[in-house]
Amino acid sequence: MNVKEKIEAFGKIVEKEAEEQRIKILKEIEEKIKIGYREKVNEAKAVWDKKTKAEAYKVEMQENKELIVYESESKKKLMAKRRDIIESVFSRVQTELYQYRSTPEYISYLAENIKSVMDTDPDSIIYLIKEDMKLAPEINAKLNANLSYKESEENFIGGFKAYSNRKNIVIDNSFLTKLNAEKEKFNPFTSIEP
C-alpha cells in the first residue's frame, strides 16, 4: 500500500469514526426529545381535565412553544457537540500528519508528487514549508534531479505548493488544503438529520 493509499484509507477511517459518533449523538438527542415530548403531552392532558377548554388551549399553546424551544436548544447542543467532535478528530489528524512528516514515506510521497508536477511543467517553482526545506537533498536524490525549492511564507503543515509558469496556476498539494477539504465535508451547518 503506497502512502497516498494510506492517507486515503486513513481519511476514510476518520470519516467513518466521525459519522458513527454523529449518528450516536443524534440518536441520544432524539430519544431525549421523545421523552421530553411525552412528558409535556402528559402534563397538558392533566391540565385539560382540570381547567376549561379555553385555559387548556392556552396551556397547550404554551407547551408547544416550550417544546419548540426545547427542540431548538437540543439541536443547538447537538451542533455544538458535533463541532467539538469534528475539531477533536481533525486536531488528532493534524497531529498525525506532523508525525508522518518525520517518516521516510513522507519523502517518497513528496518526491512522487513533485515528479508528477515537474513532468507536466518542468519550469514549475516548488514551495516547501520551512521545516521541509532540509528534505530538499533527499527529495532530489529520490528524483535523481537537482531541483531548487523556495521556502513558503505560509505554514501549510506539509506537502508542497507549485507555481506552474506554463499554465500560470498554483498547484496546491499541501496537507493543510487537503485537511480543510476533508473538514468541509463535515461542515456543522449542514443538515443534522442522520
Image: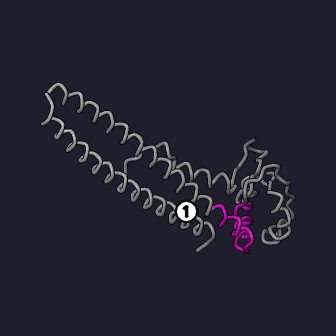
* Relative side of 189 to 95, left or right: left
Quarter of image, res 31: bottom left
Query: Magenta part mainly helix, strand or loop?
Result: helix
- Tell me the quadrant of the picture where the N terminus can be found: bottom right
Secondary structure at numbered mark 1: helix
- Residue 103 located within the stretch drawn in magenta: yes
Work out whether residue 167 or residue 129 is closer to the camera in this orientation and state it: 129
Q: How many marks?
A: 1
Task: Using a 10 Å C-alpha cutoff, classify the residue at mark 1 as few (fewer than 14 neighbours), some (14 to 19) or many (20 or more).
Answer: some
Work out whether residue 158 or residue 120 is closer to the camera in this orientation and state it: 158
Q: Position of residue 133 (x, y in %)?
A: 84, 62
Residue range corresponding to the magenta coloring:
94-115
Give the residue displayed 61% in from the left and 51% down from the top: 180
Give the residue displayed 60% in from the left and 65% down from the top: 7
Work out whether residue 187 or residue 59 is closer to the camera in this orientation and state it: 59
Task: Name the residue beneath numbered marker 1.
Answer: 11
With respect to residue 16, does 181 lie above or below?
Answer: above
Q: Single out the residue that lies furthest toward the front.
A: 50
Q: Position of residue 170 (x, y in %)?
A: 73, 46
With respect to residue 96, does 118 lie above or below?
Answer: above
Give the residue displayed 15% in from the left and 31% down from the top: 51
Query: Hey, what amino acid is under mark 1?
Result: Gly
Quarter of image, res 97: bottom right
